Image (cartoon, helix red, strand yellow):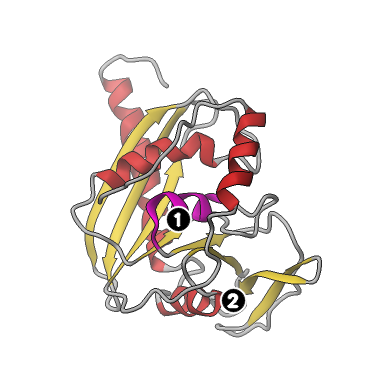
Amino acid sequence: MDIRETHPFDLAPAEAIRLQERLRKQVKPSGDAGEVSLVAGADASYARGSDVIHAVVVVLRYPDLSVVERASAATATAFPYIPGLLTFREGPAIIEAFQQLASEPDVIFFDGQGIAHPRGLGIASHMGVLFDRPAVGVAKSLLVGTATEPGPGRGSTAPILQDGETIGMAVRTKERVKPVYVSVGHRIDLSQAVDLVLATGRGYRLPEPTRQAHLFANTVRREEGRDDRQTGLPAR
């Protein structure tokens, strides 16, 4: 996949915050993804205490959700674990994984936040701006804002509110299972983002793009650790 714009990630935390505030102005929090034929899910995984980030992307055909291709990358990072700045740990590996793709996904789902973020630039918005593609944040928990509990049925929703503004939606993707928290990343309306999350569900809490990415990320991390042990290399 062609990625036209990036930036340094090895910044001091204060510099990273200033960059987030600049990039936030480039986020397009609405739009129409158009005809969707390929969707992608991205995730990152790392062992506790490790500075090696394993990032993956899984591309699926839409609407049948068959897997088209998978890619992974591992990079070492010196950026500390700071909530709200995790993109600066995971971003380089995610970019490297996407650069390996032969296909061009129409919409990208990220395991994390979009604009429902302290500075309005979670990983889905950050990567969405750099990739200039429709992007959706699908998070397992709230980072900012409040939301009432959606109804118990699949498809029930409740707005995520911050200072009276709707910044996302709590979405029940499976009956009587905890909701996911959907927010716009870039170049897509919230209503379309929610519709796509529900349309890509296959009976699990997570939509299939991020579920497949999560499974693949954990597999890649475990295999990498096993390879290190088999060759006598120190765990990273």
Q: Residue furthest right?
A: 163
Tell whether 3 sits left or right of 203: left
- From the top left corner, tell me how far across and down residue 138 is, in percent: 53, 62
User: Residues under labels 1 and 2: Cα distance?
Assistant: 24 Å
Q: Which is more toward the observer, 36 or 16? A: 16
Q: Which residues are magenta?
A: 122-133
Q: Which is more toward the observer, 56 or 236? A: 56
- The residue that label 2 is drawn on is 172
Report the residue at 38% width, 15% height from top: 234
- The residue that label 1 is drawn on is 128
Crowding at label 2, few (<14), some or many (≥20) Cα neighbours within 10 Å?
Answer: many
Query: Quick check: is 196 in the magenta stretch?
Result: no
For the stretch drawn in magenta, what is the main secondary structure? helix
Looking at the picture, does residue 90 appear above or below residue 123? above
- From the top left corner, tell me how far across and down residue 236 is, in percent: 42, 21
Q: Which is more toward the observer, 77 or 235? A: 77
Secondary element under disc 2, as helix, strand or loop, is loop
Image quarter of residue 154: bottom right
Q: Mark 2: which amino acid?
A: Arg
- From the top left corner, tell me how far across and down residue 85 is, in percent: 61, 39
Q: Which is more toward the observer, 76 or 95? A: 95
Image quarter of residue 219: top left
Crowding at label 1, few (<14), some or many (≥20) Cα neighbours within 10 Å?
Answer: many
Q: Earlier in the sequence, mark 1 or mark 2?
A: 1
- From the top left corner, tell me how far across and down residue 109 is, in percent: 43, 61
Report the residue at 31% width, 22% height from top: 228
Q: Mark 1: which amino acid?
A: Gly
